[in-house]
Image (tube, rainbow, N blue to C red):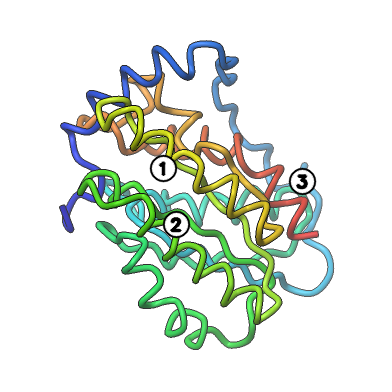
Amino acid sequence: MKAQGLAVGWAVVWLVLAAGVLAGCQKPAAPEKREAAAQTPAPQGPEKLVVAIGDSLFAGYGLRPEQAYPVRLQAALRARGINARVVNAGVSGDTTADGLARLAFTLGSQPRTPDLVLISLGGNDLLRGLPPEQARANLDAMLAELGRRKVPVVLMGMLAPPNMGKDYVRRFDAIYPALAEKHDAALISFFLHGVITRAELRLPDRIHPTAQGVEAMVEETEGVVAAVTH
């Protein structure tokens, strides 16, 4: 689990979820190549320090370091003219408890207080069948600490697969919108939405994104991050 983050067995039930819960969602457009550097606006203003703390979906499991989501998000923000530097603090296999345990260290290792923190945690809690209340408490504590430091947050949401049972799904899926509202955080409802129904954008484990899949995830989310970064 620590080596892989989200596992193959869990990916199978995600396909069931994609066919049901996400069936009514609009299919995202295929990722397009970024404009050439000469056609994009030069980044303006002071540097925006963004810290991405999460699991394998940030760490870039199965990809080269430069293909990981935080790196590609930085490129997308800079293409929008935002002078962003996105620090990849993703660790494959991390649960919400792991993220909470290293939050203070991660923040303290930065040259200054971040302008924004991205959180992508919870998938490994699901895989291990940990109580949703535990994940909620850990994320709540992270958001509370960031609130005390006056650091804005974008929370990357997850959805529980249906094989966890209706009660578990109900309790888990409520975590992200409830905490986003409580802490006034921006919310991405389902971080994997851009790739979960598209096999060509996923690695052979059927859950982690390919390099092209990461680009699709960036296109799905960069607008929300850009709005908060500004």
Residue that mark 2 sits on: 136
What secondary structure is found at the residue carrying circle 1?
Answer: helix
Above or below, 181 relative to 96: above
Q: Which of label 2 and label 3 is nearer to you?
A: 2
- Taking the spot 50% from the left edge, 48% from the top edge, the residue there is 175
Q: Residue 84: x and y, percent?
A: 67, 64
Comparing 71 with 183, the one in front is: 183
At label 1, the amino acid type is: Phe
Image coordinates of residue 193 in percent, x first then y, are 49, 30
Q: Which mark is residue 40?
A: 3
Residue 170: quarter of image: top left
Query: Element at badge 3?
Result: loop
Number of callouts? 3
Q: Amino acid at mark 2?
A: Arg
Q: Nearer the viewer, mark 1 or mark 3?
A: 1
Residue at the disc numbered 1: 172
- Residue 75 drawn at (x, y percent): 61, 52
Question: In the rendered image, which quarter is residue 221 located in?
Answer: top right
Q: Earlier in the sequence, mark 2 or mark 1?
A: 2
Marks 1 and 3, the one that precedes in the sequence: 3
Q: Residue at x 30, y 34 (%)?
A: 207
